[in-house]
Image: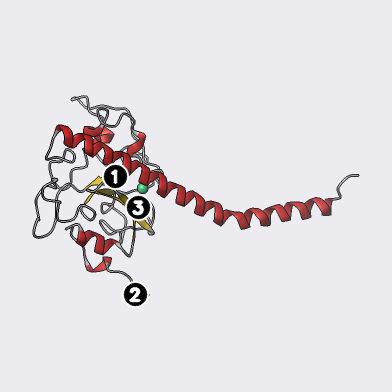
Amino acid sequence: MAFTLIELLTLVAIIGVLIALLMPALNKAQTGGQRTACLTNQKQMLLATQLYLEDYPTWFYLTADTCDDRAPSAFHPRYLPGTRTFLCPATRNIIRTNLNAQGEHLDLLRSSQGNRLDPSGGHSYEFHGWFDTAPLAGKRKTPANTVFGPSRAMLFTDADDKLPGVPGDVNNFPDAVNNHGKAGWNWAFVDGHAEWITRNQTAEALINSLHATNIFMRPLPP
Ligand SMILES: [Zn+2]
């Protein structure tokens, strides 16, 4: 018995409705999976900081100044053999194999600034190796000066610099263009834990970690 045209069209329509119903759930599962995989990356890098500390006891990672995101080049390959660990799976960021004159991976020396669509080369994380605010403003983070709160002193995050040419993008605050969009971002802390920080939790988390914040980051009124 053959299907009539009407029966086939009805079947196609039903399948279309089912797909439309499933899409939000699938997207949500994908988004959650990306956040979890990103957290796993950060936990791997936290283990690398522990190994790094064994060799350089006052350094969580190599950092020359507050804007320095070269830590992955110091982790790799000695403490972290793979380079995928330095890519947030919610982004299109890539790490190429091009080296500079010193034999360092160029794309491990710089981050993609939190531009999730950037395929031009650069890792996905930002290394906040120096405090911004009193009483430790301008000091490099060390095991000794983070004892005030190892669970709130942050070591690195999903990258988020102010992107050139993106109006309204705020530095160190989740925006649509950033790795996980406006919802939030992953942070890694001195005590070895990594955690999802929502947009509304960001201002308080920055303050708790002695980093600069601004009025636009305050939790939004309900
Ligand atoms: Zn991420």
**Mark 2 crowd level (few <14, some 14–19, many ≥20, 10 Å Cα):** few
Disc on the earlier residue, 3 or 2:
3
In three-dimensional space, the C-alpha distance between marks 3 and 2, rounded to whole angstroms, equals 23 Å
In three-dimensional space, the C-alpha distance between marks 1 and 2, rounded to whole angstroms, equals 29 Å
Which residue type carries mark 3?
Answer: Asn
Residue position marked by numbered label 2 in the rendering? 221
Callout 2: CB less than 8 Å from ligand 1 = no
The one nearer the camera, 134 or 164, is 134
Quick one: SS at disc 2?
loop
Which residue type carries mark 1?
Answer: Tyr
Residue 178, disc: 3
Which residue type carries mark 2?
Answer: Pro
In three-dimensional space, the C-alpha distance between marks 3 and 1, rounded to whole angstroms, equals 11 Å
Disc on the earlier residue, 3 or 1:
1
Quick one: SS at disc 1?
strand
The residue at the point 46 percent across, 47 percent down is 33
Quadrant of the image occupied by residue 63: top left
Quadrant of the image occupied by residue 220: bottom left
Q: Is residue 119 left or right of residue 139?
A: right
Callout 1: CB less than 8 Å from ligand 1 = yes
The answer to the question of whether label 3 and label 2 lie on touching residues, with beta carbons closer than 8 A, is no
Residue situated furthest bottom in the rendering? 222
Quadrant of the image occupied by residue 42: top left
Residue position marked by numbered label 1 in the rendering? 125
The residue at the point 15 percent across, 51 percent down is 146
The residue at the point 9 percent across, 60 percent down is 134
For the N terminus, the image quarter is top right
Where does residue 107 sit, x and y in percent of width and height?
28, 35
As drawn, 17 above or below 60: below
Where does residue 100 sit, x and y in percent of width and height?
22, 27
